Image: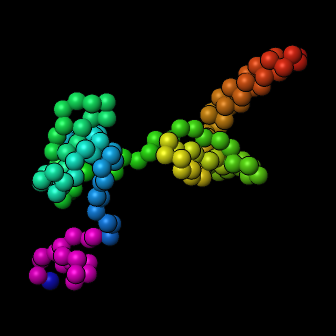
């Protein structure tokens, strides 16, 4: 052994390069790791208007800043979840060994995308959820004029 790090593949150099680099487009949100993860909207791209760097501005406005043209300090900002619903036709399961339940859910994001997931609850959380949903059902019954 020579003591030096060998590349994974001859064409990759010293670091693994399995993911494509993030190349933000105009209007994208990006987190700048050189600014402690500060999030900004990309307002100028390298090569545009003779700019040699990315220019970002806080989403609500404010002073712009620059990031390297190679985008090495920029990371994508994932879309935020807006709400979660139960998946139809799928039932919750309880795992007695783990002492937790799992409820299949669909997660909705602000960009319109969805993803299936699971709401995993401990026994204490299951009891709390039962209490809360019981109150919701009582309020629903009362709103319809029924009795509880």
Does the magenta portion include 69? no
Identify which residue is drawn at 84% across, 20% down: 144
Q: Is residue 7 above or below residue 82?
A: below
- Give the residues in magenta: 2-17
Q: Position of residue 37 (x, y in %)?
A: 26, 42
Q: Is residue 62 above or below residue 122?
A: above
Q: Examine the rendering and report whether any part of residue 99 can be seen.
A: no
Q: Position of residue 35 (x, y in %)?
A: 19, 41
Q: What type of secondary structure mainly makes up the magenta span? A: loop
Along the line of sight, the residue nearer the viewer: 105 or 81: 81
Q: Dividing the image into 4 quarters, which one contains the C terminus?
A: top right
Residue lying farthest front? 49
Along the line of sight, the residue nearer the viewer: 104 or 102: 104
Left or right of 45 in this view: 101: right
Identify which residue is drawn at 53% across, 38% down: 82
Q: Dividing the image into 4 quarters, which one contains the N terminus?
A: bottom left
Q: Is residue 86 above or below residue 13?
A: above
């Amino acid at each position: 052994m020579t003591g030096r790090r060998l590349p994974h593949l001859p064409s990759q150099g010293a670091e693994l390069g399995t993911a494509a680099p993030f190349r933000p487009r105009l209007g994208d949100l990006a987190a700048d790791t050189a600014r402690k993860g500060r999030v900004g909207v990309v307002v100028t791209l390298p090569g545009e208007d003779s700019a040699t760097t990315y220019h970002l501005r806080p989403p609500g406005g404010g002073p712009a800043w620059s990031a390297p043209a190679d985008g090495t300090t920029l990371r994508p900002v994932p879309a935020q979840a807006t709400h979660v619903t139960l998946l139809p036709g799928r039932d919750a399961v309880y795992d007695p060994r783990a002492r937790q339940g799992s409820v299949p859910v669909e997660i909705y994001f602000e960009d319109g995308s969805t993803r299936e997931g699971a709401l995993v609850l401990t026994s204490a959380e299951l009891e709390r959820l039962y209490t809360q949903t019981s109150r919701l059902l009582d309020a629903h019954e009362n709103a319809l004029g029924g009795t509880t």
